[in-house]
Image (tube, grey):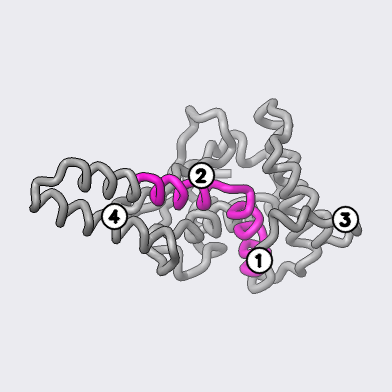
Amino acid sequence: MEPRVEIRRLLDVMPASSRMTTKIVSKPEQSQVIDAAFPLPWNRDRPIYINFDLWFRLTKAQRDLLLLQKISWLMGVKWFKPDIYQGVVLAGLLAGLVESAQADAVGVAVAGGLSAIALVRIWRTNKSPDSELNADVAAIRVAQRRGYSETEAAQHLLSAIEAIANIEGNSVNFTELIRCQNLRAIAGLSSVGVPQSYQN
């Protein structure tokens, strides 16, 4: 299949809300089937890179769910949402400006350190297994609007994760194991879900 034809098809699968910021880019030189860089706050565009030679080894349903999961993860990264860590970053930056205006080096260092700690916490939260689990659930929800049942969508995403590990020659990592267990529970293949510490 021609990559341009597949890209057009995938654009139809994507939620309308993500079409403005998410771009599908062919990247035949990458070793991953699908990849996306962690979106930084100053980058409006959120490209998804696909190696179409590897991509076409997956079934259509697996490809749909993988794309929806990646988009859900990208759209789930929120740098500027009102919570305690964003508040701490803002307070630290404002305090740093006030202290620098007063030429207080210690105050600037403390305020900068406070902001840095909060930024690291935001980064870790957005890169956690929990964010991947949330993206899986969001992808399944979107897939249901595309004609998949919840069980089918979970099964296709589960099989896609396992297929990618085989295609790329990697073993499934810890986060993927947690995701697979959660997807098995959603698909009704297992009565055991993920540990409570990974659930919101």
The residue shown at (68%, 64%) is 140
Tag 4: amino acid: Gly
Q: CA separation, marks 1 and 2? A: 22 Å
The residue shown at (69%, 54%) is 198
The answer to the question of whether label 4 and label 1 lie on touching residues, with beta carbons closer than 8 A, is no
Question: Callout 2 environment at 10 Å: few (<14), some (14 to 19), or many (20+)?
Answer: some
* Mark earlier in primary sequence (2, 4): 2
The answer to the question of whether label 1 and label 3 lie on touching residues, with beta carbons closer than 8 A, is no
Residue tagged by mark 2? 3
- Number of marks: 4
The answer to the question of whether label 2 and label 3 lie on touching residues, with beta carbons closer than 8 A, is no
Residue 21 seen by the camera: no
Tag 2: amino acid: Pro
Q: Secondary structure at mark 2?
A: helix
Q: Nearer the viewer, mark 2 or mark 4?
A: 4
Checking the image for residue 92, the label placed there is 4
Q: CA separation, marks 2 and 4? A: 47 Å
Q: Is residue 124 magenta?
A: yes
Q: Secondary structure at mark 3?
A: loop
Residue 169: x and y, percent? 69, 26
Tag 1: amino acid: Ala
Residue tagged by mark 1? 143
Q: Nearer the viewer, mark 1 or mark 3?
A: 3
Q: CA separation, marks 4 and 1? A: 41 Å
Q: Secondary structure at mark 1?
A: helix
Checking the image for residue 192, the label placed there is 3
Q: CA separation, marks 2 and 3? A: 39 Å
* Mark earlier in primary sequence (1, 3): 1
Q: Nearer the viewer, mark 4 or mark 3?
A: 4
The quarter of the rendered structure image containing the C terminus is bottom right
Q: Is residue 126 magenta?
A: yes
